[in-house]
Amino acid sequence: MYFGGDMEVAIPLSGQVCGRIDSIKTAREIVDETMAGFYATVAGLAWRPD
Amino acid sequence: MNEKPIHNRVTQLTGTRYPIVQAPMGWIARAQLAAAVSNAGGLGIIETSSGELDNVKAEVAKMRTLTDQPFGMNVALSYVKGSNIIDFVIEQGIRFVTTSSGSPKVCTAAFQQAGIKVFHVVPTLEMALKAIDAGVDGLVVEGGEGGGFKNPSPVSTMVLLPLVRSRVDVPIIAAGGMVDGLSMAGAFALGAEGVQMGTRMLSCAESPVHDNFKQAVLAAAETDTVFLNQESRPALRALRTGRTAALAPLGKFNVMEKHGRTSCSRCTLAAIWRSRFR
């Protein structure tokens, strides 16, 4: 299944985050986008008046 | 590697630019994938849970040609019985291991004497405290929403991470639910200093799995995993397919039908409680 492509011959392990994954990206894209998203999220958490 | 590096205890111990670790998926976490993650500034990890130590050794050698960045190995003690996996890993010359599915007492000191940093994977507070007693350098705290082999009583990352954080001082890498910057920021707020990604890396371009598997992950909703083998170890979380749905043990016995024939939900719950637990 892992390498032959038949999804019914074994048990395809996966976490619930399968629901949050909708495109194949390179490892570099995943790491870069995670870090950019992390910094943006953390910056957005600190609410400042005007 | 365009983003600002993170300097914290996890990156100090991994030697990487970013505290993003690729999970040690059996047969999958080999040089092609691990080198891509390490070259991106994360930490690639080579698995040993396949038990194919000759192949693993070749993969480690391949890593040296594919990347000059740090990488680690995982030791799944329960899956490699009968072989001297500790010496084998030390001989590979890496500096960072995660240990899982076995007692960290068995190997932590041996690795540390060889100059290797040890993070033990834990699914509960009790196992976290045992790992601390064994002297580990850090923990991979793994919530039950993650894939692969699991504790039979899965605890979500949202509960487990702050619970363990409140009781230990060592650096924590969060696993289970980690997929992007939002989840990483959430994990850091809950006490982590790093994240480990399995399913996200399984479905990345450099992952060696068949495209059908990657497409199945992409097509799956958040409700499309099943939790199997809860009564007979090891429990595991997998994608719902025809085969795994048939293996799922739940759904035969409807608690609400049998014990819930009352008009309001509060009465129903009281009835369940009386009948099942007294």
Image (cartoon, coloured by chain):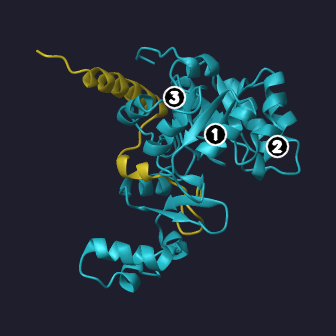
Shade of chain A as shown in the rendered figure: yellow
Label 1 packing within 10 angstroms: few (<14), some (14-19), many (20+): many
Q: Secondary structure at mark 3?
A: strand
Q: Is residue B116 above or below residue B153?
A: above
**Image point 44% across, 77% down: which residue?**
B274
Determine the chain carrying the residue at label 2: B
Residue B194 numbered tag: 3
Alpha carbon of mark 2 to alpha carbon of mark 1: how far? 32 Å
Q: Position of residue A6 (x, y in %)?
A: 54, 65
In the rendered structure, which disc, 2 or 3, sits on the residue that comes first in sequence?
A: 2
Camera-side mark, 2 or 1 = 1
Q: Quadrant of residue A38?
A: top left
Q: Which mark is residue B128?
A: 1
Q: Which residue is mark 2?
A: B54
Return the mark for residue B263: none
- Residue B34 vertical placement versus B216 (above, below): above
Pinpoint the chain carrying mark 1: B
Asked whether disc 2 touches disc 3, contact meaning CB atoms under 8 Å apart, the reply is no
Q: Is residue B132 left or right of residue B264?
A: right
Whole-number angstrom distance, CA of label 2 to CA of label 3: 31 Å
The colour applied to the residues of chain B in this rendering is cyan
Crowd class of label 3 (few under 14; some 14 to 19; many from 20; radius 10 Å): many
Q: What amino acid is at disc 2?
A: Asp
Q: Earlier in the sequence, mark 3 or mark 1?
A: 1
Chain at tag 3: B
